[in-house]
Image (cartoon, rainbow, N blue to C red):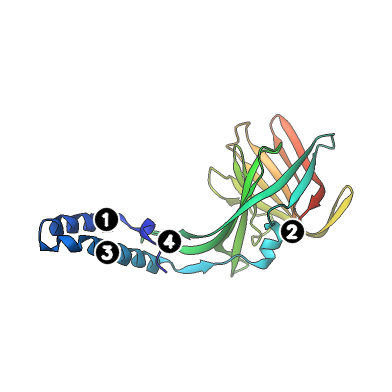
Amino acid sequence: MCAGIQGINTESLHFIKCLDKFVSGGKMKKYRLLIALFVLLTASCQQDALVEEYYELSAEFLSYCYFEPGSYWVYQKNNENVFDTIVVDSIISYTGVNGLTEESDNRFIYDAIEELVQIPNKQNIRKWEIAASLKTNVSGNEVSNELLRIYFNDRYNIALYPNTPQGEKIDFGSKEGYYETMAHFSQFSIPGNTFYEVYHTRVYDSLHPGGIRITDFYIARNHGIITYTYQTPVDTVTWKLVDWDLTQ
């Protein structure tokens, strides 16, 4: 299926304008709309031809971060009498296109899901995005990858990008900082609960308004984020999961 006129490029638009001037004053005037539509669709399909690969979300990755509306987590802050509930409000699924120009080196179609949560909440979480991504070279092999991006009110971070070598920092640019997979545990406990198949990841955010912020996430299969700690030059905050009701 063609991408539609959103994928139209500058050259095609220029051609349409010239063609419109040519047909508007002559006998072909009544056909100008049909000709314009034909050019738009042709250019759009040419753009589709530039897309080389299609990346899908795997059931394995979704088990860490996809939850149906109504699912909720109750977190406790710093072992204090401060609690916060995160509730999935709605879900948007879509297919994205990366690199629609001939100059792009990374042209691909990818599956993506946005999970919007009820706001306000004490953790300032607005939503998270789940997306298929480019393949990653792991030990000489090209491995499909996926990512989980958490949107806070002031910043957003990639919290899980699993198929990467442990201990290797990956630069996601100035807006998102560095990501690192620290460890993967078959079993991991926090006070009161034990979880299975848990990733420990770390994000280095140098543009956070309060100064550099280092965040450690622990993300468990079928549970999502079970605890995370962020440190800034002036503060350290930990949120841990104490109760939940989740549907996947």
Residue 34 visible in the displayed image: yes
User: Which residue is pictured at 18% across the width and 59% down the height?
Assistant: 19
Q: Is residue 150 visible to the viewer in this orientation of the structure? A: no
- Residue ID for mark 4: 105
Q: Which mark is residue 13?
A: 1
For marks 1 and 3, give the CA distance.
9 Å
Mark 1 vs 2, N-terminal side:
1
Q: Position of residue 137 (x, y in %)?
A: 58, 65
Disc 2 + disc 4, Cβ < 8 Å: no
Total labels drawn: 4
Nearer the camera: disc 1 or disc 2: 2
- For residue 247, the mark is 2
User: Mark 1 or mark 3: which comes first in sequence?
Assistant: 1
Pick the quarter of the image with the N terminus.
Answer: bottom left
Task: Answer few, some or many: residues within 10 Å of disc 1's Cα (few below 14, many 20 plus, some between 14 and 19).
Answer: some
The residues bearing labels 2 and 3 have C-alpha atoms spaced at a distance of 46 Å
Please state which of residues 42 and 193 is positioned toward the viewer in this rendering: 42
In space, the residues marked 2 and 4 are separated at their CA atoms by: 38 Å
Residue situated in front as seen by the camera: 99 or 69:
69
CA gap, disc 1 to disc 2? 47 Å
